[in-house]
Image (spheres, rainbow, N blue to C red):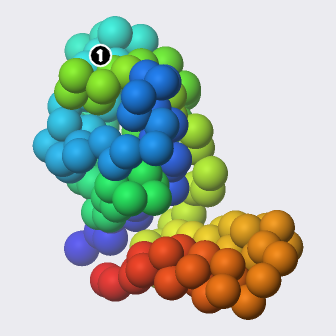
Amino acid sequence: MVRFKNRYFTTEIVPLDADRIRKPLNITTYDIVKSVLAVTEQIHGEFGAASIRNGLEVKYCDNSTQIAVIRCRHGPHRLLASSLPFLSNIGKNKVQIQSMYTGATLVKCFKFLKKFHQQKIEEALEGCRTDAEKKKVLETMSKTKYEL
């Protein structure tokens, strides 16, 4: 029996609408899958869409941090990676996708996200002047949990 290898794309969903920059996007995993399939079909045709459709799944989507982890089969993951930068709409939202990390396991992606958010927290704490500000920053930024 042959084992199927997967690749996981850790991506940041950046809203392009001025009023959506501070608010959560409220995007579902189905919207992301549908948009990724549509843009892959535009770029690579029916062959590209059919090759990534089999193993395509959104494993993690956080609306507050606007980060998603997308799973794809090894091999067709190259087609997905080349079409992600051209994704401009998810649902009714105008967005831009920034690829942050490509990993072979979900655990490695979550380790990367933990390290990434730790750096963001440290950057935010450097700008704080009082202990009350630091406490407020820690409370708001440490709500994200990474669970398998």
Counting the numbered discs, the total is: 1
| Image quadrant where residue 119 sits | bottom right
Place of residue 8 in the rendered image (x, y in percent of width and height, measured from the top left): 45, 58
Direction from residue 23 to residue 123 in the image, left or right: right
Direction from residue 96 to residue 69 in the image, left or right: left
Direction from residue 66 to residue 27 in the image, left or right: left
* 148 or 96, nearer to the observer: 96
Place of residue 54 in the rendered image (x, y in percent of width and height, measured from the top left): 20, 44
Place of residue 139 in the rendered image (x, y in percent of width and height, measured from the top left): 51, 84
* 136 or 96, nearer to the observer: 136
Instruction: Work out whether 57 lies above or below 97.
Output: below
Going 49% across and 19% down the picture, which residue do you hit? 86
Q: Secondary structure at mark 1?
A: helix
Q: Is residue 83 visible?
A: no
Going 48% across and 37% down the picture, which residue do you hit? 21
Q: Residues within 10 Å of mark 1 (few under 14, many from 20)?
A: some
Place of residue 115 in the rendered image (x, y in percent of width and height, measured from the top left): 67, 77
Instruction: Work out whether 48 lies above or below 29.
Output: above
Looking at the picture, which amino acid does disc 1 mark? Glu
Going 42% across and 80% down the picture, which residue do you hit? 143
Where is the C terminus found, in terms of image quarters?
bottom left
Q: Is residue 51 visible?
A: yes
Going 83% across and 76% down the picture, which residue do you hit? 129
- Name the residue tied to disc 1: 41
- Residue furthest left as drawn: 30
| Image quadrant where residue 2 sits | bottom left
Where is the N terminus found, in terms of image quarters?
bottom left
